[in-house]
Image (cartoon, rainbow, N blue to C red):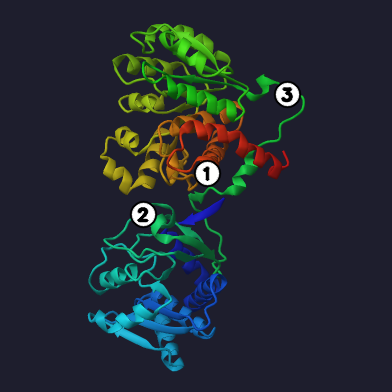
Amino acid sequence: MRKVCSSSQMRELEKRAEKIGIPPLILMENAAIGVANYLKEIIDVADKKILVLSGRGNNGGDGMAVARHLKNSSADVSVVIVDGEKSFSSESDINFKILNNMGIPIFLVRNNLESIDHLFDSADIIIDALFGTGLTREVSGIYRDLIFKINNSRKYVLSIDIPSGINSDTGEMMGIAVKANSTVTFGYLKLGHLLFPGREYAGDIRVVDISLSCDFDTTFFLIGEEERGILKRRGPNTHKGTYGHMVVIGGSKGKSGAVSMSAKAGLRTGAGLVTIVCPVELNNIIEACSLEVMTFPLQGSEGYLDVNSIDALKAFLEDKESIVLGPGMGFNDKTINFFENVMKIIQVPTVIDADGLNCLSIKKDLLKKVNTDIVLTPHPGEMARLMDVDIKQVLKSPVELTMEFAKKYSCHVILKGATTIYSDPSGNVYFSTYGNPGMATAGSGDVLSGIIGSLIAQKYSVRDSIILSLLLHGRSGDYAKECFGEYGLNATDIIEAIPMVLKKWEVNNGC
């Protein structure tokens, strides 16, 4: 699992480096070497025309130092520097003077961009060093015009640290941003590399070491392939009871598929037993969906689960290991009342999804009264309802809101999206970038809930269950994409891919 930095943490790391004797100029030099080496790794730079666009801060100094290293590797380098009242940083000034002494062509621009059109036209590669990770304001003036020219150049673009115009803490585009083919960043990934649209604008990302050797505490982490090591080897002397009994509670008229998909995903992930609790009116339909899944029908009301069956449910749940609550349950007075009473009797870790989240949005204080782990799996719309905010606020501040809710209600919150954000009750945040656009389909979230519930039933810790589930869900979606493509991919395809991915992991992990 990789550490991820905020911009303030990055500044603190640079200060720590200076305290132990590594000055900013050395960090800048190391950064430039890292960028130049990456570019030389992917392309033969000899005789290539490379245009470096530099601001006047340290990111611009990085760009000027990169230009020097590329020139020394026989590239044909030109540097455009934004002219203005702002002076260079001391490190940038040193690199500017070196460029002058080396005779590298430097073009100072303030407003007449037509004078450098020929540089854009002839360039093979453009290096973006206009803004670094400290940008918090809207991009305007000459910088906006330069970014527009970069994006319209149709050339290969490499951004230094983060694409200029992207907020490194939020991934937000500050009016306009460079659309890079690749980005070389320093020391650690930044939040803006993982959150959209920054993740899309960064292209391929390479992290290079620049001697930020001081260890640091962070609450941000990126889930990686190594997390498959969480998967345990199964012992020979085991039986279905060893791998737990997961219960899925939900279903209503027209929504029987949701509970079936959660249940099937749970079985495919390895739960020993899976039972669906559903209204009796749906029992025959749900039983026909899967031979391996059991059902526990409850007397409902007009096709919805009803509080009058709560005593029977309480007795049934006594020896179970995990619960998935809410898929296809419906959202009305009956199900709200049922949900409230279920929350009063649960004693095992419970994943709340879909209509369960809608019910919870008007009964949030129930979270403070349970004595077990609760996992919430909202998409942005459901998160907005949970927090009583507009969905635009969720999309603007997804990390802060997810962390805030998890800490306030002492629960695990998984905000689903192209970059999925998971916060544990302590406020540690984990990002998952696995999966593909084909997974934006009905039932994909039900599958994720079933995977999580299954791993909890198999006695993985809640945290490990979530982290492994996010990796497994994303990788299963990617496997399904290879088979069916993105357009026709559906949730059932993801379910069927789960054992294929687990099989690969068993071999790689030595399970």
Query: Nearer the N terminus, badge 3 or badge 1?
Result: 3
Query: Nearer the N terminus, badge 3 or badge 2?
Result: 2
Examine the rendered structure and indicate whether residue 30 appears above or below residue 268. Answer: below
Question: Which quarter of the picture shows residue 211?
Answer: bottom right
Q: Nearer the viewer, mark 3 or mark 1?
A: 1
Question: Which quarter of the picture shows residue 12?
Answer: bottom left
Disc 3/disc 1 C-alpha distance (Å): 31 Å
The residue labelled by disc 3 is 238
Q: Given the image, on which type of amino acid does mark 2 rest?
A: Pro
Q: Residue at x 43, y 36 (%)?
A: 413
Question: Which quarter of the picture shows residue 301?
Answer: top left
Q: Given the image, on which type of amino acid does mark 3 rest?
A: Thr
The reply to whether dot 3 and dot 2 touch (C-beta < 8 Å) is no
The residue labelled by disc 2 is 197
Q: Nearer the viewer, mark 3 or mark 2?
A: 2
Spot occupied by residue 360 in the image (x, y as percentages of width and height)? 35, 26
Classify mark 1: helix, strand or loop: helix
Q: Residue at x 39, y 89 (%)?
A: 105
Residue 87 visible somewhere in the drawing: no
Please state which of residues 165 and 350 is positioned toward the viewer in this rendering: 165
Spot occupied by residue 183 in the image (x, y as percentages of width and height)? 46, 65
Crowding around mark 2 (Cα neighbors within 10 Å: few <14, some 14 to 19, many 20+) is some
Classify mark 3: helix, strand or loop: loop
Crowding around mark 1 (Cα neighbors within 10 Å: few <14, some 14 to 19, many 20+) is many
Examine the rendered structure and indicate whether residue 388 appears above or below residue 187. Answer: above
Examine the rendered structure and indicate whether residue 18 appears above or below residue 78. Answer: above
The reply to whether dot 3 and dot 1 touch (C-beta < 8 Å) is no
The residue labelled by disc 1 is 478
Could you tell whether 32 is left or right of 300 in the image? right
